Each structure stands twice: as structure tokens, then as C-alpha cells.
Amino acid sequence: RSSNLYGKYTSAVFVSPLGEDNSAFNQRFEGYQRRLIQASNTTNSAAIINVQWYKLDASSKESMDEGLSYLFSGCPHQSILVSSVKLASDIENALQSYGCHLLPDNPTMLGTFDTSAATFDAIDAGTMEFAIDQHNHLQGWAPVHFAALYVSTELVVS
């Protein structure tokens, strides 16, 4: 979507699976929160962004539906970042069923970490803005760097 919504953000949520706490999720939340606050401070808007972390119980359909209803009833969030691709499709479907992505003045922006075929389909359909494919940088960066170092210098890092 081509609109600049930074000045309109009042509520954002980071969603992760209940019981799956780790330092990567902590860093993702802190970076998300920090960037939204920085962006709001660079606009002329006096709006304060409330960025919360919601741990979604996905252990059963009932608990998932209850959590999604809590998150999206009334479409209170302008930005949603999902911690992993495990929940992304369910959240994207909930946003569509509640009509949050269709609000003309303030559509909900959705992004996730990791990628899947469903994620790319959602991006193509315009119901998800982005997905961060972490594998190229976290898991794949070091081997490529070390291979290039070996080819160019014949040095091996041990």
C-alpha cells in the first residue's frame, strides 16, 4: 500500500505463540517497538503509539479463535508484526474476516518473519505487506562469507 501511515499509528501489536519465548522474539519486539516510536517522533503527529506484545494461545481452535477475536475485534491495531510464519496465515485470515485490512483511512498493516508459499500468496494478494526471510542472513550468511574468504585468501577461519 502506498500510504504513509506512521503519523496515524496509535496501536501496534507483536504476536508470538504462547510458550515460545526466546531471545530472538525479544529482539524482534524491541526493534519493532523502537522503530515505530522513532517513526512517530519524526512526524508532526502528536499521537502516541502503544506497542504491545501478545502471546497467542494456539493450542486449540477455541483458544486461537478467542485470542484472534480479542486482537482484531473492532480493528484496533494499525500495525501487526508476527514473530514467525507459524501464526501468519491464521492472523492474515482473521484480519480479512474482521475487515481490518479494508479500512479506508487506517488499514491494518501486517508483516511476519520467515517465509512460506502462503506468505508470498498473501503479499501478492495485498493482505500482507512484507515477510523477512531470515535464513539468507542468519543461517546462510556465514558459510558464504567464509567460502569467499577461503577463495580470495586461502585462509580458513577455525
Image: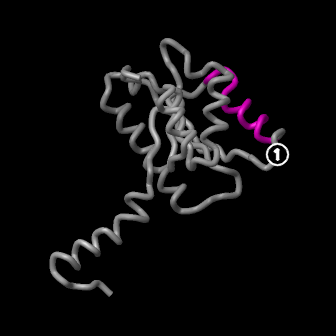
Q: Is residue 68 visible?
A: yes
Q: Is residue 7 left or right of residue 24?
A: left
Compared to residue 127, the image places residue 38 above or below, namely below
Q: Identify the image quadrant of the C terminus.
A: bottom left
Q: Is residue 140 above or below residue 41?
A: below
Q: Is residue 10 visible?
A: no
Q: Quadrant of the N terminus?
A: top left
For this orientation, the residue located farthest to the bottom is 158
Viewer-side residue, 99 vs 78: 99
Dominant SS of magenta comes to helix
Which three-letter amino acid code belongs to the residue tagged 1? Ser
Q: Is residue 68 magenta?
A: yes
List x then y, in percent, for residue 108. 53, 25
Q: Residue at x 48, y 32 (%)?
A: 123
Name the residue carrying label 1: 60
Which residue is painted at 41% across and 62% down in the image?
A: 138
Q: Is residue 66 above or below residue 2?
A: below
Magenta-tinted stretch: 63-75
